[in-house]
Image (tube, rainbow, N blue to C red):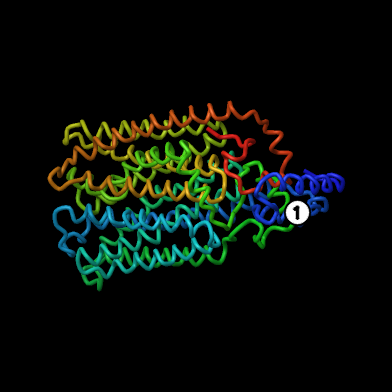
Amino acid sequence: MATSEKDAERHNVNITETSSNHDDTPSNVDGAWKFLTGHRDADLKNQVDLKALRWRIDRRIVPLLLFAYTIQFLDKIVFNYAGVMTMRQDLKLQGNDFSNLATFLFVGQALYEIPNIYFVQTFPPAKYLAANLIFGGIATACGAAARDYQTLLVSRVFLGFFEASIPTSIILICSQWYTKPEQGLRFSIWYTGIGIGQIVGGGISYGFQNMGTGAVLAPWRTMFLTTGCLTIVVGISVLILLPDVPMTASWMSVGEKVAFLKHISVNQTGIHGGKFRWREVVEAFMDLQVWLLLLAVLLNAMSGGIITAYSATLIRNLGYGPKRAALINMPSGAVGIVFTLLAGVGIRTRSHRWAWVLVCLIPTMIGGALMSFLPIDDVAGILAGIYLVSAAFAAIPIFVNWTVANVAGSTKRAFAVSASCTMFAVGNIISPQTFQARDAPQYRPAKITVLATQAGAALVTIVLALYYVWQNKTRKVKDSDIKESFMSPDVWARMTDRENKKFRYSY
């Protein structure tokens, strides 16, 4: 995409003219545009192989995001496995105490998402992610010192605080590095951390349950301490290795950065705004697509009680001991990984995010039906249902990818992503509460809730896709027009998707 001197001069004129037509002046546009204007001819000196550059970005960015997401989910999932170890007895948990502990992590997460909307927009993204990983690891490790229900509750709430920003930060960082078609697969790769966390968590639980009787700490305490320390190590690695924005990446030359920014400009969503704008928050509240996305995430997250807190307990109630329950639960993670990657590859090659959401939700509905209506002695069928429910979370990266792809304006996008994470937390607050002690051991109302909410999420997904089709029909913009306008401040301006009439929605 070489640009001649004459073209550069023409772009300079266009920049000045366009900037006067709206309130986003050159000093008020995304930092990527400023970088491009300061290095107009850098790509004339070197031809950049974008395919090789993208592969280098994949190697340096995606593994760090995958490790970060896996370890933060592992901090959650070890609580699931601790529930079939001796934690209940050691802390004298009674009645709905276990359900409440599972719930209040997400209460902390939901509460922190409110200030997080501001913090994730104004703080350096990678450093903010690293700091919350480190503090989240400390909170998890402190759970090993819990003496009773109240002290573990404090640890869980603080873990929710610090982990609130981790998914939001990862989502926004990933969206900086890839175009809309490229994002789906990368989102799916780091989101497999849920499945990996389930598998690793089962193995860790089994290993710690085989500790000798002379151990200083109870196995579940050692498990909390170990995973917390691992989270701190990952946080330090992110702090050292992950650049805040592409323009500060030390392993890219100036020419590569210019070529990359031109490549990514088709998103028309900018890189990182660095300034909070209340008017964009107001617009998000008035935007139907945001509400539909939030409702879909909320309904989808209602399967979380089984995945993050009760799957091991349900398996144990089928007649298995604690050690075998931990091992038998591991295939749930494999199911989640398969569906997450399947959807990611499908979106990259076939697009149609709405269809791949349904591919994930239909097996989840089948799983909910199997758990709800099969007799308790049909162990194989119920196990299949428990495993299939893990396909539900494969839809979450599609929803968040939809959000970053279709919500433009740095503050509006940060708000929408944080709000989605809040709805995810709210779904996980409600979901464990459907598991009431009076319904043990089958917990049929909770299982039926999974079936009903996933069917609702599928319906909302179809409505959302139809909304995007309708919106695009009112905006007659060619892709070629967008690709040729990379030096226009309209591409890099902090305009929202509503303000930018050239913006096109993906569905």
Residue 308, percent from left and from top: 31, 49
Identify the residue at image location x=53%, y=35%.
347
- For the N terminus, the quadrant is top right
The part of the image, by quadrant, that contains residue 438 is top left
Mark 1 crowdedness (10 Å alpha carbons): few <14, some 14-19, many ≥20: some
**Amino acid type, mark 1:** Thr
Identify the residue at image location x=66%, y=58%.
247
**Nearer to us in this view, 18 or 335:** 18
**Nearer to us in this view, 175 or 137:** 175
> How many numbered markers are drawn?
1
- In the image, 119: left or right of 437? right
- In the image, 385: left or right of 96? right
**Nearer to us in this view, 17 or 397:** 17
Identify the residue at image location x=57%, y=29%.
472
- In the image, 334: left or right of 1? left
Q: Identify the secondary structure beneath mark 1.
A: helix
Identify the residue at image location x=46%, y=36%.
288
Residue 179, percent from left and from top: 61, 43
Q: Which residue is mark 1?
A: 37
Image vertical order of residue 459 relative to residue 228, above or below: above
Residue 462, percent from left and from top: 43, 28
Residue 154, percent from left and from top: 28, 65
Image vertical order of residue 145 relative to residue 61, above or below: below
Residue positioned most to the right: 6
